[in-house]
Amino acid sequence: MVRKLALALLVVAIGGCSAQPPQPILTPVQVKVPVAVPVYCKVAKLDKPVLPIAALKADSAPDDTVRAYAATVAVLKGAVRQRDLIIAGCVASPLDQTFPAATGAAAGGGAK
């Protein structure tokens, strides 16, 4: 009786293992991920531009107001261009870019 019970448990144990689908073999995948690196450079502090709309008063004529707003837009566009030129001068050279190796699912992907 004990042998039959042991044999039955052995058959159930072996049968239970074979019912599971085979697990895939996990292999690491190397993925190159660009990492943003701050670039520090010393630049002179930009002065705030003097805006023509600051000179407007509550009783300013409508055509003076329109002219002041148009001039303000032109001044601000020039300030943005100046800022962009300064930022462009601080960009790291393409030779400084590195791509550290990352592996596995934590890197955000697999082989394509």
Image (cartoon, rainbow, N blue to C red):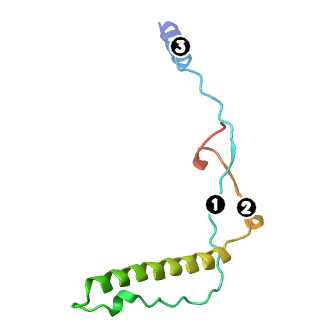
In what quadrant of the picture does the C terminus appear? top right
Query: Could you tell me if the residues under marks 2 and 1 are in contact, i.e. CB atoms within 8 Å?
Result: yes
- Mark sitting on residue 15: 3
As helix, strand or loop, the secondary structure at mark 2 comes to loop
Q: Is residue 90 left or right of residue 75?
A: right
As helix, strand or loop, the secondary structure at mark 1 comes to loop
Q: Give the labeled residue for mark 2.
A: 98
Q: Compare marks 3 and 2 and give the one earlier in the sequence.
A: 3
Q: Compare marks 3 and 1 and give the one earlier in the sequence.
A: 3
Q: Position of residue 48 (x, y in %)?
A: 47, 89
Residue drawn at the location 78% of the way across and 65% of the way down: 95
Residue drawn at the location 62% of the way across and 80% of the way down: 86
For badge 1, the amino acid type reads Val
For badge 3, the amino acid type reads Gly
Q: Position of residue 45 (x, y in %)?
A: 56, 89
As helix, strand or loop, the secondary structure at mark 3 comes to helix
Q: How many marks?
A: 3
The single residue placed furthest to the front in the displayed view is: 63
Tell me where residue 100 sits by quadrant.
bottom right
The single residue placed furthest to the right in the displayed view is: 95
Q: Give me the C-alpha separation between circle 3 and circle 2.
A: 52 Å
Q: Give me the C-alpha separation between circle 3 and circle 1.
A: 50 Å
Residue drawn at the location 50% of the way across and 13% of the way down: 12
Q: Give the labeled residue for mark 1.
A: 35
Tell me where residue 93 sits by quadrant.
bottom right
Residue drawn at the location 51% of the way across and 17% of the way down: 16
Tell me where residue 25 sits by quadrant.
top right
